[in-house]
Image: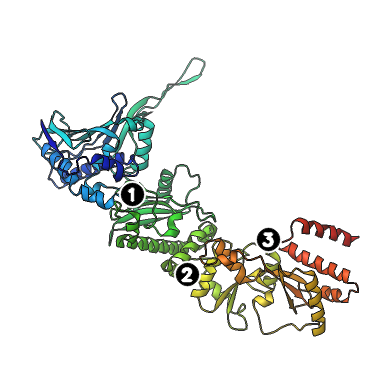
Amino acid sequence: MSKGKINVSVENIFPLIKKFLYSDHEIFLRELISNGTDATLKLKHLTSIGESKSEYGNPKIEVKIDKEGKKLHIIDQGLGMTAEEVEKYINQIAFSGAEEFLDNYKDAAKDSGIIGHFGLGFYSAFMVAEKVELISKSHKEGTTAAHWTCDGSPEFTLEAHDKTDRGTEIILHIAEDSTEFLEEARISTLLYKYNKFMPIPIKFGTKEINDPEHTPATTKDAEGKETTEPQKKITVDNIINNPNPAWTKQPADLDDEAYTEFYRELYPSQFEDPLFHIHLNVDYPFNLTGVLYFPKMTNDLNVQKDKIQLYQNQVYVTDNVEGIVPEFLTMLRGVIDSPDIPLNVSRSYLQADGAVKKISSYITRKVADKLKSLFNSNREDFEAKWDDIKIVIEYGMLSEDKFFEKADAFALYPTVDGKFFTYEELFNKTKANQTDKDGKLIILYASNKDEQHSYIEAAKAKGYEVLMLDSPIVSHLIQKLESSKENISFARVDGDHIDNLIKKEDTTISKLSEDEKKTLEELLKETIPSEKFMVQLEAMDSDATPFMITQPEFMRRMKEMQQTGGGGMQMFGSMPEMHNLIVNVNSELVNEILNTKTKKKQERLITQSLDLARLSQGLLKGEELTNFIKRSYELLK
């Protein structure tokens, strides 16, 4: 037996490991199983090229709990190590650069991912164990097994062991403050969280299943009553992982059902299947594989986040993929796996990393190409799914210029009548009829079919197309479209009378003289609250609505943008709600108001007309609504 001291000048580095390396102690299990997996995969490579005479077989990693002995065992059937290799890899390399690492990264350690690159992964065991034993038998012929023991100080012992089967067993003597890791449910949860898709089978106990070789016999008694014997059960290893998940396979080897099955495996609590998937597979200029799914979306931009799982070589790392996946795609679900993402440094470094930026732009491009392909191959199906995916696409158009450029090929603009146009189709359909006298194309839209029904009907009566744009970010999106497309303007149908929204050359002549207009203006000013309404006198067709309430496009849009995070627009949030009141001077009602003899009746007609206009816009509430109903009944008498 030999004794020694780990080569490190910090007198006791283990408290530092416990304090700084990981924000969460549960990571130790991931690290130790990752080490076992690496050792097994290395052996597979050596046997395949003939550099190891060992029989590879069907190795697995086993996790065992000894609750009575307060021990946790992690056993692999990988390369194994000789005593010399234990001395080298566990005692020397593990701590080369350890102090420097701690100095540089202790502040960022809360964001740390896999630290194994620094050789410290094995020592994460000391976060939960008061003593660690390592028993290892090398694959090399004629070697003796080694037994290393360390109690969390720089002192260790190394001696021969009688282990005869190849591989490494790590025994953790669990510390008093970490006995949760002796609970089967806790370990099971961790294995499913971090190791569900590891490439080597992981055994955790056994389970009983129906014997596939046994078919229960059925017999009949004298009376013809049937009896079936019990199903024979057999005990098998409880393998907790799927070593060959969908993202590790070629897209050609998977059908839609296989992708859906994998989605259910990732999200067992989800009842709805995804709408479609995107398989990522690239090996230059970086390695990245994965499958992203479009679930059914809601209009809430926050509810869906943190559903994409990030892996490194099939080892789960995090579901916070900010900086790696473009912001607008964090509402999707699925898996991304890349060995090229530097997971062992702070997130601020990650976001500035060149490779990560390339990965982010690759994912953006790949998603855009897939959406274009889905649109081209089955437009009808794409249109049917538009409402469920539009929020992601619109958000992407707003936040990523490259995506915005590509989106013309698949972004849709639905109408209130259920038709769908691409931007080019919309432009060609409307340019002849909806261009105003200044040559600008006016694209009309509604945000609520019921509330804006009368305005929509007025626009349709003139043969205009009205889009149905109702997502929470529509104000931001149309602002971007207006600034990037030439000579177009969006106008919500209730922003003004339809003749004012799309001004043509011809104007209707007013039936009122200038004096009559002045008289009308005075009457309106006396009755209508100026802090709520700006009155506009308009000469329109006599059958047009006499009183119409609109909200100026600019003011309403700025308020909406401020409510959904438009920076620098706070001033619009505090302004009072102002509306325009358009009064049709050619209507019979206006004529009647002017010709009514008593001032009281004139005021009553104006108030009733204003309230009808407010009622149509949902602006009549409380006491004003009560008074309106009372007044309406009196008028009926």
| Alpha carbons under labels 1 and 3: distance apart | 47 Å
Q: Residue furthest top?
A: 222
Residue 391 left/right relative to 153: right
Res. 586 mark: none
Q: How many marks?
A: 3
Amino acid type for the residue under numbered disc 1: Tyr
Mark yes or no: residue 221 visible: yes
Numbered disc in front, either 3 or 2: 3
Asked if residue 627 is positioned above or below residue 114 in the image, the reply reads: below
Crowd around label 1: few <14 · some 14–19 · many ≥20 (10 Å): many
Q: Circle 3 sits on which residue? A: 450
Hey, which quadrant is residue 76 in on the image?
A: top left
> Spatial distance from mark 1 to mark 2, Cα to Cα?
33 Å
Identity of the residue furthest to the front in this view: 11
Q: Depth-wise, is mark 1 or mark 2 nearer the camera?
A: 1
Q: Residue at x 68, y 60 (%)?
A: 450
Which residue is nearer to you in this view: 351 or 230? 351
| Residue 92: image location, x then y, percent | 15, 44
| Residue at x 88% of width, y 60% of height | 634
Secondary-structure class at tag 2: loop
Q: Amino acid at mark 2?
A: Asp
**Image quarter hosting the N terminus:** top left
Residues under numbered marks 1 and 3 in contact, where contact means CB atoms less than 8 Å apart? no
Q: What residue did someone put label 1 on? A: 311
Disc 2 marks which residue?
Answer: 408
